[in-house]
Image: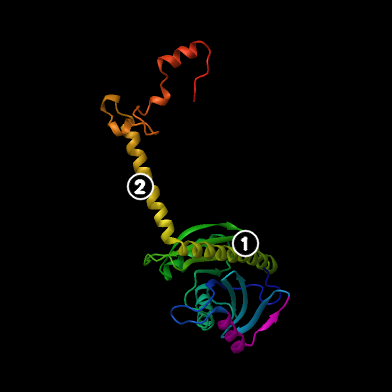
Amino acid sequence: MSSGDLLKNPELIYIATFQEGKSEDGSTSVPKAFQEIVHHYKPVYSETEDAYAFGIGSSEAYVRISQEGDLWAIMMALKSKVGAIQFSQIQTNCEDDMRAFTQLLPRDPISLSTLRIASVKGLGEIKSLVLGYADGRGKILRCMGKVHDCVVSTLESQVTDGSTSPLRREMIIVPLSRNDEGAASSIWMLTRDVFSLTSYTAMLGHLRSGRELMLNQVDASEETTQLRIDEILMELRRPKEQLKPEVLESPQGGDGPLLAPFCPSKQHEAGLRKGQRYPT
């Protein structure tokens, strides 16, 4: 995935995955929604990149759409046309412009990733920028690390409703390269990975949701079986005199004790002393 000449240095990237078909709430399918977007914004299509570019509000937009089975993945990247302003204000402006686009999409994404790109003058500014933005948005910093020559900070909400759908990720990305070409290369390399991760996460979530009842039944059956095994093992650890008759019953249904197959009789012992093979 490369932005080519359409949009080199985005400031906000939105990646969402949807299931094909009409939603229960009456929202339109992804193909129909995208037709409305193309009709409304008259984007320029790049065949080499299989992507669309257009202006929306005070931002430049770059959009890609792909299909895998009955799942659709949409990636939209925005760059503000406004001059140099603070990071939080850039994000607010881009979000306002993106909202007009996302309102045309189905309202029930399976997974959703938001990438916020920032630039700093020095490495010492990264943590203060991330924490300042997180505090202002009611978020907490979950983790921070270096990926593809970028510092990636993952945020999560301080208050959640316990819902796992859709699967959401939010990251602040700071490219470490000091030139535009290097920064753009790092950003789009990372975006490609997140795009794949978002799509595959949606596939796995979709597969699990369709088999939730079966998986719950399997888990319950395994738990019951394990409890029974533990009970039998506890019984076998007791002295032989305290074992219950049913535990001593032969697995072949005979009257002999459970340990009988492992205890040679006097005849067997005599045979073994003569070099005969113990029957199995």
Magenta region, residue range: 31-47
Which is nearer the eye, 12 or 40? 40
Amino acid on which the number 2 mark rests in the picture: Thr
Which is nearer the eye, 55 or 202? 202
Let me know if residue 146 appears in the view.
Answer: yes
Amino acid on which the number 1 mark rests in the picture: Leu
Q: In this view, does 103 lie above or below 198?
A: below
The number of discs equals: 2
**Where, by quadrant of the figure, is residue 16 drawn?**
bottom right
Residue where numbered disc 1 is placed: 176
Of the two numbered discs 1 and 2 on the same chain, state the one appearing first in sequence.
Answer: 1
Q: Distance between the residues labelled 1 and 2?
A: 53 Å
Which is nearer the eye, 168 or 69? 69
Check if residue 32 falls in the magenta segment. yes
Residue where numbered disc 2 is placed: 224
Give the residue at x 57% y 60%.
151
